[in-house]
Image (spheres, rainbow, N blue to C red):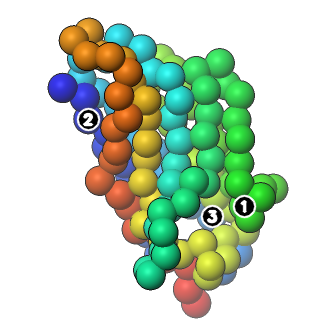
């Protein structure tokens, strides 16, 4: 069984920073893509950033230059560094990972979500 556990959300003032972490654990053979999605109230879930096992990253235009995605393969962990936060970044942020376990083919897994609120 595979689990994703997120941490690092919270309340921050506009212009502030937060760092989200997501650690994968369980019967992991290999992790392919890892990424972050977000869902604001009344809106659909959207992709924010994704990173491959080799470190190639893609970031959505609305956060490019402010957010950075990285991963530590030894720790099975992906990070999202969020700087210059804006109120429109307020959302629940979800970690996503495509993982092949020792007993199953590659499958998408989701974290439980962590709230990020940007407000003065």
Q: Which numbered disc, 3 or 2, marks the residue that appears first in the sequence?
A: 2
**54 relative position to 27: left or right:** right
Does residue 73 appear anywhere in the picture? yes
- Residue designated by label 1: 63
Image coordinates of residue 22 in percent, x first then y, are 42, 42
Who's the residue at 60% across and 40% down the image? Answer: 50
Q: Do the numbered discs 3 and 1 sit on residues whose CB atoms are within 8 Å?
A: no
- In this rendering, the answer to whether 36 lies above or below 77 is below
The answer to whether 58 is drawn above or below residue 101 in the figure is: below
The Cα–Cα distance between marks 3 and 2, rounded to whole angstroms, is: 26 Å
The residue at which mark 3 appears reads as 17
Is 36 on the left or on the right of 4, as rendered? right
Q: Nearer the viewer, mark 3 or mark 2?
A: 2
Q: Quadrant of residue 82?
A: bottom right
Please name the residue shown 18% across and 26% down the image.
1
| Element carrying mark 3 | loop
Residue under numbered circle 2: 3
Q: Is residue 14 shown above or below 26?
A: below
**Residue 54 vertical position relative to residue 69 in the rendered view, above or below:** above
- Pair 3/1: label in front: 1
Name the outermost residue toward the left. Answer: 1
């Amino acid at each position: 069984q595979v689990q994703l556990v997120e941490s690092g959300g919270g309340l921050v003032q506009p212009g502030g920073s937060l760092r989200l972490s997501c650690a994968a654990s369980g019967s992991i053979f290999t992790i392919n893509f890892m990424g972050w999605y977000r869902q604001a109230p009344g809106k659909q879930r959207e992709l924010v950033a994704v990173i491959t096992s080799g470190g190639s990253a893609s970031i959505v235009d609305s956060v490019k230059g402010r957010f950075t995605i990285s991963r530590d393969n030894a720790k099975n962990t992906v990070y999202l560094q969020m700087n210059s936060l804006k109120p429109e970044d307020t959302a629940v942020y979800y970690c996503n990972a495509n993982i092949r376990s020792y007993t199953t083919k590659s499958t998408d897994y989701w974290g439980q979500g962590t709230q990020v609120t940007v407000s003065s």
